[in-house]
Amino acid sequence: MRKTWWSLNKSLYLVLIPMLVLLCACSSQEPSQTVTIKFSTWGSTQELSVVKNLIRQFEQQHPHIHVDLIHIPENYFQKLHILIAGDLAPDVMFVNSLNFPIYAENNILEPLNIDSTQFFPAALKAFQWHGRLYAIPRDVSDLVVFYNKTLFKRAGISEPKSDWTLDDMLKISHKLTQPGQFGFSFNAKPPFLWLPFVWSNGGDIFDANFSRFTLTQPEAIRAVQFYADLRNRWHVAPTRMEVGNATMSQLFLQQKLAMMISGRWSVPILREQAGFQWDIVPFPSGKAGSVVSIDASGYAMSHAGMHKTESWELISFLSSRQAQQQLAQSGLIVPARKDAASLEKGNYFLKAMERGLPTHTPVRWNEINEELTLALEPVWDGTESADQALKTVAPKIEKLLR
């Protein structure tokens, strides 16, 4: 009986197949000794320079790990959404406390654990969702008031004290407003730049469970109207037409603005470019005190990532005291770690953190923010009252909360 081709070659295949499998495994193992993980972040040129340097240090200490840096300078979260939707989520993602809830709720992020004693409680709380931690905080963004000491001296006005009030701020703003110069800054968005007025007056956007939209409460409405009146009633802050394409930082540098609400991120450019003396002071107190938003940025891990051990190595390194100190020395951040926080200017950034509130947001925050931004535009422009605008938009936001 003639043997078939398969029977003649069966024994050969039985020998060759295991050898081929072994060879493939060996060849794939050799390159895989160096694991590549993807890390996405936003950031200015200056910040990116520090981040790249940190990655070089990490790769030197971990020669088996290569970090593929994905820099997304604009529309970060929209582009991150696209990557996630296409099953291309980076292994490590730089996120902020405003936008992370939608990822945590939809099982995009891996729950993490860290020694909580090393971090400021507000920074950790900002990244908790249903009792679990979903990102290791790198920095905390809180707000202070930057002021031009030279303009104060020129006007013969005493510099603001740490216990000043919103009424004090308004009086000082009037004295510092003159042709071509305004007393106080105005930012229509993002919300965290005007939220201190609401919180310091005892109001809030939502209740604790995100079940109700509370910006329609009297304390909140009065605060929003007060902020709009800085522009439209008292004219101590520039209107949209008067601002043009300039930012508040640019107006401050041009000495067209005597006081400006901002955060630690403004320090480097002021150090480099300000041709005048400047300082900072806490946000003025309302009837509920001086309460600013505590937003955090930090490192999250993809739940679907294939290299979680290596991803955790990177997160641990970037969250270390040494890494946070390097970023803090650049003037860019308020470190989230207690042992990395040693700031100048009276440590007002740290004091603001003690009194501030984490800006917790619901899962559909992006949609709510769009509705709120549109509703408040006529308020900021002085064509509609805060009471009317907020009560009109309330049903839409309540629906999104449900």
Image (tube, rainbow, N blue to C red):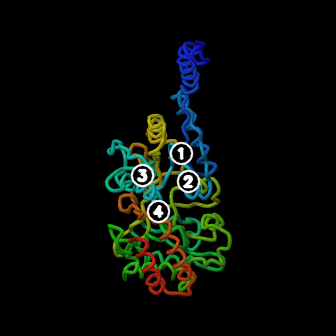
Crowd around label 3: few <14 · some 14–19 · many ≥20 (10 Å): few
Depth check, mark 3 against mark 2: the one in front is 3
User: Residue tagged by mark 3?
Assistant: 107
**Amino acid type of disc 1?**
Pro
- Give the SS element for disc 4: loop
Name the residue furthest front: 1
- The numbered dot on residue 143 is 4
- The numbered dot on residue 80 is 2
Residue at the spot 55% in from the left edge and 43% down from the top edge? 39
- Give the SS element for disc 1: loop
**Amino acid type of disc 3?**
Asn
In this picture, is 128 found above or below 153? above
- Asked which quadrant contains residue 129, the reply is bottom left
Crowd around label 4: few <14 · some 14–19 · many ≥20 (10 Å): many
Residue at the spot 63% in from the left edge and 53% down from the top edge? 272
Depth check, mark 1 against mark 4: the one in front is 1
Sooner in the amino-acid sequence: mark 3 or mark 2: 2
Residue at the spot 58% in from the left edge and 60% down from the top edge? 277
Sooner in the amino-acid sequence: mark 1 or mark 4: 1
Sooner in the amino-acid sequence: mark 1 or mark 3: 1
**Amino acid type of disc 2?**
Leu
